Image (tube, rainbow, N blue to C red):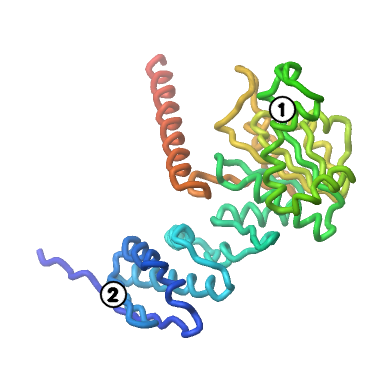
Amino acid sequence: MTQTPTQTTRHTVVVPPSVDMVSVLGPADEHLALIEDAFAADVHVRGNRITLAGEPGEVALAERLLDELVTIIRTGQGVTPESVERIIGMLREETQERPADVLSLNILSNRGRTIRPKTLNQKRYVDAIDQHTVTFGIGPAGTGKTYLAMAKAVQALQAKEVNRIILTRPAVEAGERLGFLPGTLSEKIDPYLRPLYDALHDMVDPESIPKLIAAGTVEVAPLAYMRGRTLNDSFVILDEAQNTTPEQMKMFLTRLGFGSKIVVTGDITQVDLPGGTRSGLRIVSEILTGIEDVSFNRLTSHDVVRHKLVGRIVAAYDDFDARQEEQVQARREERR
C-alpha cells in the first residue's frame, strides 16, 4: 500500500522594522525555542524575516502566534516566555477571542504597574464582572480570583461607579481560638484578613489606605459583620466563600443593595468547615443557575499564574481526587 506523502507548506513572515526582533524572539532566542518546540514546523530567521516550513495547519498556527506577538509588542507591553506559552495554549484551543486582546486588556495601573488578565478564563471572568451584578469566581489557588476582583473594585471606585469597597471573609479557621489571641478584636482578626490588605496595597498607594478605611471608603471585615445590613453603591467581595455555610451564603447575597456589585470567590476543593457541614459555595450554583444577572465562572489549573509548579500541583490533586471518586463509585457498584 502506497503512503500519501505528508503535505508541507512554506511561508515567510516579515516582522515590521518598527518592532524589535529581540522582543519577538526573546533574550537568547527563548521565545524562538518555545515556538520550535510547540509546532511541527521548521523555523528559520534571517534579519526580520521568519520562514516557517511544515504541515499547513502548524505553519498557519505559528504564523498566527507571530502576528499576536507583534500586536502585543506594538502596544508597548513586554512579552515573556510565560505569555508566549499562554498564547500558544489559546491558539490550540481555537477560541474566538484573540490572545492579544486577552493579554492587552488593562484593568488597573498603579505606580508603573499594570494589572491584566493572563489567561482566557481570567478575561472571561473580568468581562463577567463588568456585565453582571453578582459574579462567582470558582477555582484553585493562584488563578487570580480575588486579585482580579480587587482590581475591578478599585477601578470601579476610581471611576466613581461605586462609593465604597467592602472586602469580607468568613473567619472559619480562627473559630473559638480568637478569644485566646492577644489584643483587641480587630487586632485578632487582622492576620486573617491580611491577604485582602496585601492585594489592596498592590493597587492603591499604601499611605492612602488608612485614610480610605477611616473614611469608610474601604471596609475590611469578617462575614459576620455583614448581617442585618443593606449594601448600597458598593463593590462587595466575599473571599474564601467555600468556608460559608448555605445560610451564611444566603445572608450575604441578600445584603445586595442598589447600585452595587458582588463578587464571590472560592475554591471548593479547600473547605475548612467542620465535618458534615455543607459548603454554601458548593450548592449555590445549583440554586442560582439560570437566574438573570448572576454569572458563574470556573477557573482551572491552566489558569494558575503563580510558579509553573503550582499549576502542576493543582492538576495532580485534581487527578488524584478524580481517581478517588472513581474508586468510591466502583465500590458502590460492587455492593449492589
- Which residue does the numbered mark 1 point to in the structure image? 171
**Circles 1, 2 touching at the beta carbon (< 8 Å):** no
Q: Is residue 290 left or right of residue 95?
A: right
- Against 305, is 224 above or below? above
Residue, far left: 1
The residue tagged with tag 1: helix, strand or loop? loop
The crowding category of the residue bearing disc 1, from other C-alpha atoms within 10 Å (few below 14, some 14 to 19, many at least 20), is some
Q: Is residue 145 left or right of residue 46?
A: right
Please report the residue visible at 79 percent of the width from the left and 47 percent of the height from the top: 209
The location of residue 135, given as percent across then percent down, is 70, 46
Three-letter amino acid code of the residue under disc 1: Ala
The residue tagged with tag 2: helix, strand or loop? strand
Q: Quadrant of the C terminus?
A: top left
Please report the residue visible at 54 percent of the width from the left and 55 percent of the height from the top: 119
Please report the residue visible at 80 percent of the width from the left and 58 percent of the height from the top: 158
Residue, far top: 335
The location of residue 213, given as percent across then percent down, is 84, 43
- Which residue does the numbered mark 2 point to in the structure image? 53
> Of the residues under marks 1 and 2, which one precedes in the sequence?
2
Nearest the viewer among 105 and 328 is 105
Three-letter amino acid code of the residue under disc 2: Ala
